[in-house]
Image (cartoon, helix red, strand yellow):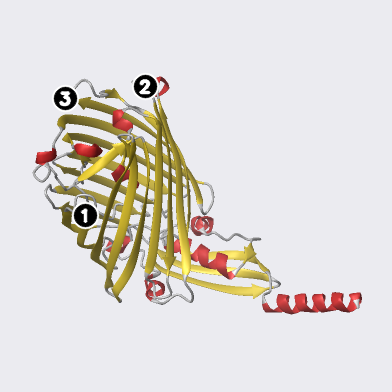
């Protein structure tokens, strides 16, 4: 009986193996137009000798699509002697494209960007950006090359901070286009003129397909019209880890020049089954005399996002964020807008020593065709910040309706946000977005 059972198990295993044969990758052949074939093979996830599975083969293709420098990408395979050879036919090129845009609201902002891709034949992307508003200006440059990412940012702000009952203060920043001065003047408790100068360097290294590590030193100087606040240097360094898999990428600037649309046809097709994606970010910021800071800074943060993409491409998105200012003076406290998703627009925010927030949104595609995507994205977001001896909520609900051309990577449309704390409403033009 035992021998019979053993035979049945062996036969079952044989049948299973016959249905799903296990193979390894043989040779990876690449034909390119601009970059060297060896460069493309290096950027391809599967290498000779790796285990070949349909899932990993699909991931490897997606990685090349996400470089966004190809006008054509064809993949094929050939099996022989228990190995799978992979053939890649790629038509890569380069692009460099300027773009100017403006945002409106109670305050206006304008910016100019310059994006480039594959100039050095490495599948890299680079950018330059400068923008300004009544609150100040910011400029940034960066390059993503292989497993490495570098950027430098300079920001100079000149604005008023206004403080209200229950810990509320106005929002500020180069692209904060809301202004609460008229609407909330009757609740004003205090006002401080503020100047901030910041230089940020970022280096990120890709450790694996899903894991990245980064370091971000910052030079920060704050100047206040009132000496009782913490004017001076707030230099700090942030260390972090990022984990992402099958999560939607950002803007595809190559599309403006006709590149990076190789998966357009695939994106218009329904999925064979619903799929999930996720992203997580863990970071720690520290500063003190050892960074040249006049104040001690110690902050811990965690961010997470989960996405469910349905068969018809509609998406359910959820986000969670938490921060704890273990040691921080006034300028480095937690802001409720840092704990919200960015889907909503608000005149005011809370600041405190710690807090957490969450968001849920459903992206529904009203139209999906060869020209572009029309979507409606209702959302709800809430954050709790510990201030004044208790946790106080900052929440809002609303929706964004936007249209995105395949050949123009930024969604543009209208956003409506209802603040659930004070009942205020914000309606503004949207240019760019998270999907």
Q: Is residue 32 visible?
A: no
> Residue 263: x, y in percent?
40, 69
Q: Which residue is mark 3?
A: 225
Instruction: Residue at 39% x, 65% y: name it.
Output: 316
> Residue 70: x, y in percent?
39, 64
Q: Answer few, some or many: residues within 10 Å of disc 3's Cα (few below 14, many 20 plus, some between 14 and 19).
A: few
Nearer the observer, 82 or 152: 152
Figure check: 197 above or below 414:
above
Q: Is residue 365 visible?
A: yes
Q: Is residue 343 left or right of residue 178?
A: right
Q: Answer few, some or many: residues within 10 Å of disc 1's Cα (few below 14, many 20 plus, some between 14 and 19).
A: few
Q: Which mark is residue 292?
A: 2
Q: Marks 3 and 2: in contact by CB < 8 Å?
A: no
Q: Which comes sooner in the sequence, label 2 or label 3?
A: 3
Say which quadrant the N terminus sits in: bottom right
Q: Which comes sooner in the sequence, label 3 or label 1?
A: 1
> Residue 126: x, y in percent?
34, 49
Q: Is residue 139 left or right of residue 314?
A: left
Figure check: 223 above or below 99:
above
**Residue 46: quarter of image:** bottom right
Q: Secondary structure at mark 1?
A: strand
Q: Answer few, some or many: residues within 10 Å of disc 2's Cα (few below 14, many 20 plus, some between 14 and 19).
A: few
Q: Which residue is mark 1?
A: 99
Q: Nearer the viewer, mark 1 or mark 2?
A: 2
Q: Nearer the viewer, mark 3 or mark 1?
A: 3
Figure check: 6 above or below 355:
below
């Amino acid at each position: 009986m035992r021998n019979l059972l053993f035979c049945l198990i062996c036969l079952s295993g044989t049948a299973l193996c016959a249905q799903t044969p296990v193979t390894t990758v043989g040779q990876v052949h690449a034909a390119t137009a601009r970059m060297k074939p060896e460069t493309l093979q290096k950027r391809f996830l599967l290498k000779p000798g790796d285990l070949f599975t349909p899932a990993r083969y699909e991931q490897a293709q997606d990685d090349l699509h996400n470089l966004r420098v190809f006008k054509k990408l064809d993949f094929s395979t050939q099996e022989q002697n228990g190995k799978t050879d992979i053939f890649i036919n790629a038509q890569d090129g380069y692009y460099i494209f300027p773009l100017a845009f403006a945002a409106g609201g109670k305050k206006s902002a304008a910016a100019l960007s310059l994006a480039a891709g594959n100039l050095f034949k490495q599948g890299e992307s680079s950018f330059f950006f400068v923008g300004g508003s009544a609150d100040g200006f910011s400029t940034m440059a960066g390059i993503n090359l292989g497993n490495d990412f570098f950027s430098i940012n300079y920001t100079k702000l000149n604005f008023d901070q206004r403080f209200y009952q229950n810990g509320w203060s106005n929002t500020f920043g180069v692209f904060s286009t809301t202004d609460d001065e008229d609407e909330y003047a009757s609740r004003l408790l205090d006002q401080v003129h503020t100047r901030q100068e910041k230089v940020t360097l970022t280096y990120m290294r890709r450790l694996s397909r899903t894991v990245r590590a980064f370091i971000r030193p910052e030079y920060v100087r704050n100047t206040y019209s009132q000496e009782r606040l913490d004017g001076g240097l707030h230099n700090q360094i942030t260390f972090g880890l990022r984990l992402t898999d099958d999560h939607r990428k950002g803007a595809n600037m190559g599309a403006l020049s006709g590149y990076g649309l190789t998966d357009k046809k695939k994106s218009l097709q329904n999925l064979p089954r619903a799929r999930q994606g996720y992203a997580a970010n863990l970071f720690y910021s520290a500063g003190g005399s050892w960074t040249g800071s006049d104040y001690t800074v110690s902050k811990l943060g965690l961010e997470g996002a989960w996405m469910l993409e349905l068969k018809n491409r509609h998406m359910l998105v959820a986000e969670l964020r938490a921060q704890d200012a273990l040691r921080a003076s006034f300028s480095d406290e937690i802001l409720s807008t840092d704990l919200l998703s960015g889907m909503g627009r608000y005149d005011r925010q809370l600041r405190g020593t710690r807090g957490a927030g969450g968001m849920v949104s459903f992206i529904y595609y009203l139209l999906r065709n060869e020209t572009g995507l029309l979507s409606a994205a209702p959302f709800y977001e809430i954050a709790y910040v510990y201030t004044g001896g208790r946790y106080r909520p900052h929440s809002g609900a609303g929706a964004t309706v936007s249209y995105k051309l395949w050949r123009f990577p930024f969604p543009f449309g209208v956003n409506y946000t209802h603040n659930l704390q004070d009942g205020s409403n914000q309606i503004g033009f949207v240019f760019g977005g998270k999907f």
